[in-house]
Amino acid sequence: MDIRAVRTQGNGCKGLVFRAHVSRYVSGGRICERRELRLLKRESCPGCKECGWIFDSQAEDLSNGCGVSLDNLEDGALYRLTGSGTPDHETGIVDWIEWDLSKVDIGA
């Protein structure tokens, strides 16, 4: 996915764009690896109905042992996080969200 396409989606939402950071270090007799996604505010939507719910949903999902996987992050790469789900036909509530973490190319 090209970052230019993210900036110009038809609905006006740029989505949430992150830079991946992976660090490995030794500390106090432990060998550690830390993986994180840092939000790029200038490249991301400030929050709308299309993406404003993502952080709250991720917090709930991660506390329940699921959520987006950070296993295959490439240090320094850009990613766009999206989620989609289908509402339950009886309650109308989306109770399962399929997360997609797509690598974004830096276009000229």
Image: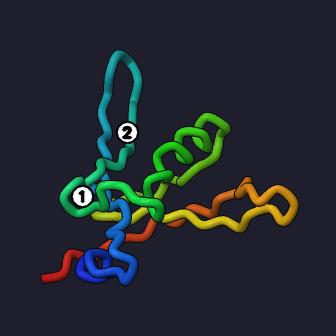
Count residues near mark 2 (Cα–Cα under 10 Å), then give few for <14, some for 14-19, many for 20+: few
State whether residue 70 is above or below residue 13. above
State whether residue 17 is above or below residue 66. below
Q: In the image shown, does 13 or 55 lie closer to the viewer? A: 13
State whether residue 82 is above or below residue 62. below
Instruction: Specify the quadrant of the image occupied by residue 24.
Output: top left
Q: In the image shown, does 19 or 59 lie closer to the viewer? A: 59
State whether residue 63 is above or below residue 53. above
Relative horizontal placement of residue 7, taking residue 92 as reference (left or right): left
Name the residue at 30% across, 48% down: 38
Give me the C-alpha separation between circle 2 and circle 1. 13 Å
The tag on residue 53 is none
Instruction: Specify the quadrant of the image occupied by residue 107.
Output: bottom left
Kindly give the residue lying farthest to the top in the view shown.
28
Count residues near mark 1 (Cα–Cα under 10 Å), then give few for <14, some for 14-19, many for 20+: few
User: Given the image, on which type of amino acid does mark 1 rest?
Assistant: Gly
How many marks do you count on the picture? 2
Where residue 90 appears, x then y in whole percent? 87, 60
Where residue 59 appears, x then y in whole percent? 53, 39
Name the residue at 61% across, 34% down: 63
CB-based contact (under 8 Å), mark 2 and mark 1: no
Relative horizontal placement of residue 70, taking residue 24 as reference (left or right): right
Q: In the image shown, does 43 or 100 lie closer to the viewer? A: 43
Tell me which colouring the rendered structure shows: rainbow
Q: In the image shown, does 64 or 45 lie closer to the viewer? A: 45
The residue singled out by tag 2 in the image is: 34
Where residue 106 appears, x then y in whole percent? 20, 75
Where residue 95 appears, x then y in whole percent? 73, 53
Quarter of the picture containing the C terminus is bottom left
Q: Secondary structure at mark 2?
A: strand
Q: Secondary structure at mark 1?
A: loop
The residue singled out by tag 1 in the image is: 76
